Image (cartoon, rainbow, N blue to C red):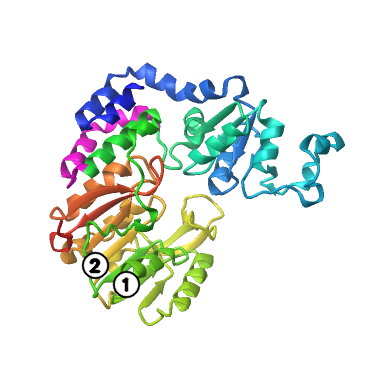
């Protein structure tokens, strides 16, 4: 059993974790950042197959190309055997010539099924799993005989100049620079589950040790921890990053349809169209207001990457769409918000800063994502405490690794009695 696993198996204390982090010499941790991927991939570290052709896979491919590395292919479980050749063995097909023109392509790279990718490259390439919550895929690839399979995080460490910060991943040595802020966050957390969560995430982010983490909670409760917060039939819900209405559906289900109103912010036009369709399907048009704005700490135009997916986000990159941003403090609210959720792809600190007066005056429940940037794990609780120090703070996680983490700020009168 690893030292981190032994530590995780005990009652975690923050000072134990920080001592472990600070005990590693600087040159050692920086070497580990550079070399972890090569230790997994060995001589195959330049022959890569990216498993997962979604948004993360595309971002990794674009970054690798900037670093001068061209992967061999994508693999993806959404790709089946070509119907014209489904009765032929892989070896028969390759004898006829493995024609990649038969495969779909993403960013110019062929996309293979898992079985075909494993047959073709399982012994001659490193498979990098470029999906979040990839443990089942890593097991799948191992069962298919792939010799070298890696989480994407070590690859991001290796090419840090290209990738970091991205995907919630940061270089381990930078955790050691944040000890004071981490201690401040830890001291403000309201229960042992939250304190164990921050300790486990620190261990995972530093060593990528899965044994350090508690099991993920039920994803259906993301943003709505019914064991912590008491619902109100007069709830005025504000959904920042409403996407296609999925969170609105979950909110309505958890509240049994008994709420006063919902304000849904979604700047991506395609997502907003899907959101409007969801509102109509749920017959909630009289209780839902859709707003076409990003949320931040300014009022005005900003650049926004509109992907028509949950990964749409504010960006400084050229060629992005120009959309409007609003501070929550400056919205003319016809009804006072009582519950605010923020899942806005790393813009959460700016959005909180733009809601300072609203939070101070009206004390809404807060559900704010912490996983888009590594430092948000402690920065966001600290920011909430600085604005509404009377709120009780909790950390919860609803997915593998460090993904789908949420900080809840709950005023005393909204805490569920235990």
Specify the quadrant of the image occupied by residue 401.
top left
Residue 133, position as x, y percentages in the image:
47, 43
- Decide: is 234 above or below 39: below
- Decide: is 133 above or below 234: above
**Residue tagged 2:** 231
Residue drawn at the location 70% of the way across and 44% of the way down: 108
* Magenta segment, prevailing SS (helix, strand or loop): helix
Near mark 1 (Cα within 10 A), the count class, few <14, some 14-19 or many ≥20, is few
Instruction: Answer with left or right where residue 349 lies relative to residue 192.
Output: right
> Front-most of 61 and 207?
207
Asked if marks 1 and 2 touch (Cβ < 8 Å), the reply is yes
Q: Which segment is the magenta one?
A: 171-192
Q: Secondary structure at mark 1?
A: loop
Residue drawn at the location 32% of the way across and 25% of the way down: 4
**Residue tagged 1:** 256
Specify the quadrant of the image occupied by residue 65.
top right
Task: Assign the N terminus to one quadrant of the image.
Answer: top left
Task: Assign the C terminus to one quadrant of the image.
Answer: bottom left
Question: Could you tell which of marks 1 and 2 lies nearer the N-terminus?
Answer: 2
Farthest bottom residue in view: 286
Residue 214, position as x, y percentages in the image:
32, 39
Residue 51, position as x, y percentages in the image:
59, 40
Instruction: Answer with left or right where residue 111 lies relative to residue 191.
Output: right
**Does the stretch in magenta take in 38?**
no
- The alpha-carbon separation of the residues under discs 1 and 2 comes to 10 Å
- Decide: is 217 above or below 186: below
**Does the stretch in magenta take in 181?**
yes
Residue 166, position as x, y percentages in the image:
45, 41
Residue drawn at the location 23% of the way across and 37% of the way down: 182
């Amino acid at each position: 059993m690893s030292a981190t696993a032994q530590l995780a198996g005990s009652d975690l204390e923050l000072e134990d974790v920080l001592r472990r982090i600070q005990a590693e010499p600087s040159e050692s941790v920086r070497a580990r950042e550079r070399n972890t991927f090569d230790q997994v991939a060995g001589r195959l570290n330049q022959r890569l197959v990216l498993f997962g052709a979604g948004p993360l896979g595309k971002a990794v491919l674009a970054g690798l190309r900037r670093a001068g590395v061209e992967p061999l292919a994508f693999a993806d479980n959404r790709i089946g055997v070509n119907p014209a050749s489904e009765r032929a063995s892989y070896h028969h097909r390759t004898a006829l010539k493995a024609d990649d023109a038969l495969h779909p392509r993403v960013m110019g790279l062929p996309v293979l099924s898992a079985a075909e990718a494993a047959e073709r490259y399982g012994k001659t390439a490193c498979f990098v799993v470029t999906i979040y919550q990839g443990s089942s895929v890593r097991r799948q690839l191992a069962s298919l005989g792939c010799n070298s399979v890696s989480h994407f995080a070590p690859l991001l460490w290796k090419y840090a100049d290209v990738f970091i910060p991205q995907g919630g991943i940061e270089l381990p040595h930078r955790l050691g620079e944040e000890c004071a802020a981490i201690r401040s966050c830890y001291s403000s957390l309201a229960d042992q589950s939250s304190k164990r969560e921050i300790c486990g995430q620190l261990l995972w982010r530093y060593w990528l040790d899965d044994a350090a983490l508690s099991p993920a909670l039920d994803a259906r409760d993301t943003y709505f921890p019914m064991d912590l917060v008491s619902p109100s039939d007069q709830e005025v819900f504000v959904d920042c990053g409403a996407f296609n209405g999925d969170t609105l559906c979950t909110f309505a289900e958890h509240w049994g349809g008994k709420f006063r109103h919902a304000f849904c912010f979604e700047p991506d036009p395609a997502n907003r169209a899907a959101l409007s369709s969801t509102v109509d399907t749920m017959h909630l048009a009289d209780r839902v207001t859709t707003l076409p704005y990003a949320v931040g700490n300014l009022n005005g135009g900003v650049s926004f990457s509109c992907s028509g997916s949950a990964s749409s986000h504010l960006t400084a990159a050229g060629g992005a769409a120009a959309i409007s941003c609003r501070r929550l403090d400056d919205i003319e609210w016809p009804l006072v918000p009582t519950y605010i959720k923020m899942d806005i792809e790393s813009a959460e600190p700016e959005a909180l800063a733009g809601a300072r007066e609203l939070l101070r005056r009206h004390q809404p429940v807060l559900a704010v994502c912490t996983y888009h940037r590594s430092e948000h794990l402690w920065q966001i609780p600290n920011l909430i405490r600085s604005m509404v120090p009377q709120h009780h703070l909790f950390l919860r996680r609803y997915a593998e690794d460090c993904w789908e983490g949420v900080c809840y700020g709950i005023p005393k009168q909204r805490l569920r009695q235990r």
